[in-house]
Image (spheres, helix red, strand yellow):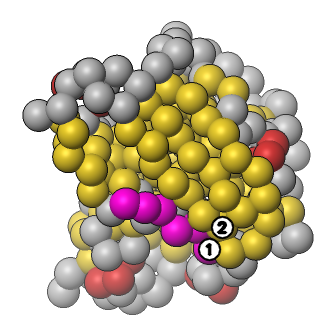
Amino acid sequence: QVQLQQWGAGLLKPSETLSLTCGVYGVSLSGYYWSWIRQSPGTGLEWIGEINHSGITNYNPSLKSRVTISVDTSKNQFSLKLSSVTAADTAVYYCARAIVWARYFDLWGRGTLVTVSS
Amino acid sequence: EIVLTQSPGTLSLSPGEGATLSCRASQSVSNSYLAWYQQKPGQAPRVLIYGTSRRATGIPDRFSGSGSGTDFALTISRLEPEDSAVYYCQQYGNSPPLLTFGPGTKVDIK
């Protein structure tokens, strides 16, 4: 069954680094772009960035200075790191698969609530 | 950056009625790169329409998409209670690569 399973710490203190991983099951990483998207009441859905199986990345300019997305093809998974988090980074974080030619998301993880609080 | 604006913010309708949701872009969007999603509480978004007018797998033909340039629409005919959700449009621009979502339209079917 094709699915994305995501995991990572759900509670962080300000200035810490957010770290999430998305396992890809039932499909190869090849041929798609793999994204991280977050959603908070204040900012709605926000695309964070993407990576393909070769490690080519694109980032949202608003977050680029703090974001690193990486891929591990041996484990069929990809990861997100967001540094120097603040309360504004509190959100539900989703991993998702994008169809390359049309750049829409046809497969999503269930989401991880990340709360930043001192 | 292309900014998407959606209207109306909220729609309250009855079963059997139709709805047209608008998505307006601050700059022209390629028809290939405009998609619509449905999101219910506690769930991830689900794609309904991609490439402006192509229905995703398993989406009933009550859902249709149209538009070009800066004006796009999602039309839902014969509304059912299960259509209660928030609907988002999303675009992709490639110079530089950037995906953005609209703020959403909440549809309430009573």
B92 or B8: nearer the eye?
A: B8
Q: Is residue A62 above or below residue B66?
A: below
Give x and y (percent) for residue B101: 55, 60
- Quadrant of the rendered structure where residue B91 is? bottom right
Residue B6 in the magenta stretch? The answer is: yes
Q: Quadrant of the C terminus of chain A?
A: bottom left
Residue on which disc 2 sits: B25
Same-subunit check for callouts 2 and 1 = yes
Label 2: state its secondary structure. strand
Q: Which residues fall within the magenta stretch? A: B3-8
* Main secondary structure along the magenta-highlighted residues: strand
Q: What residue is at 78 percent from the left and 58 percent from the top?
A: B69
Count of marks overlaid on the render = 2
Left or right: where does residue A106 sit relative to residue B104? right
Give x and y (percent) for residue A42: 32, 75
Give the chain of mark 2. B
Q: Which mark is residue B110?
A: none
Residue on which disc 1 sits: B3
**Marks 2 and 1: which is nearer the front?**
2
Residue B97 in the magenta stretch? The answer is: no
Q: Amino acid at mark 1?
A: Val
Label 1: state its secondary structure. loop
Which of pointers 2 and 1 lies earlier in the amino acid sequence?
1
Q: What residue is at 33 percent from the left and 47 percent from the top?
A: B86
